[in-house]
Image: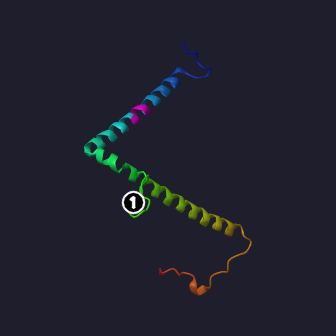
Amino acid sequence: MAIDAPGVSPTVDRESGRFRRNVWLTWLLLFALLGVAFHGLHLDFSYVGQKLPFLLGLRLAPDGFIQGAALTILVTVCSMFFALLVALITALGRLSRIRSPSPSPRFTPRCSAVRR
């Protein structure tokens, strides 16, 4: 027998149970739709199994280059490194007491709209 916590009404507990049920039903529906979509594609799982080592990056391409998930992870790590480098340089520039020179008036953009 469950002991009710003080200050918690049974309606809150009932709504919490309803919310959890709806979350599980939503996930079940999403997985069912995903299964129907895969079934509708008529995938050849033997062919996918044959190419899986290449897709996962466990084997190299005929020219010796990595491919599949390993290549994706390598590109992601490289792009994150360069983004972090640019962000660090930008942050250090913002913290610097040295001010960049003001642009000359000939290089400042002008508004092309004519005021009347």
Does the stretch in magenta take in 109? no
Is there any visible trace of residue 112 in the rendered image? yes
Q: Quadrant of residue 34?
A: top left
Does 114 sit above or below residue 44? below
Q: Which percent across, then down, holds residue 82?
A: 57, 64
Q: Nearer the viewer, residue 30 or 104?
A: 30
Toward the viewer: 83 or 95? 83
Quarter of the view holding residue 86: bottom right
Q: Position of residue 115 (x, y in %)?
A: 49, 80
- Residue farthest toward the right in the current orientation of the protein: 97
Name the residue that disc number 1 marks. 61
Q: Which residues are magenta?
A: 23-27
Q: Principal SS element in the magenta part?
A: helix
Magenta segment includes 26: yes
Mark 1 surroundings: few (<14), some (14-19) or many (≥20) residues within 10 A: few
Please tell me which residue is depicted at 68% across the width and 67% down the height of the picture.
92
Q: Secondary structure at mark 1?
A: loop
Specify whether 21 is left or right of 94.
left
Residue type indicated by callout 1: Ala
Determine if residue 115 is in view. Answer: no
- Examine the rendered structure and indicate whether residue 58 appears above or below residue 3: below
- Spot occupied by residue 23 in the image (x, y as percentages of width and height): 44, 33
In the displayed structure image, the side of residue 113 where residue 100 appears, left or right: right
Residue at image location 49% in from the left, 55% down from the top: 73
Q: Position of residue 97 (x, y in %)?
A: 74, 71
Q: Nearer the viewer, residue 34 or 10?
A: 34
- What colour scheme governs how the chains and residues are painted in the rendered image of this protein? rainbow
Q: Residue at x 42, y 58 (%)?
A: 60
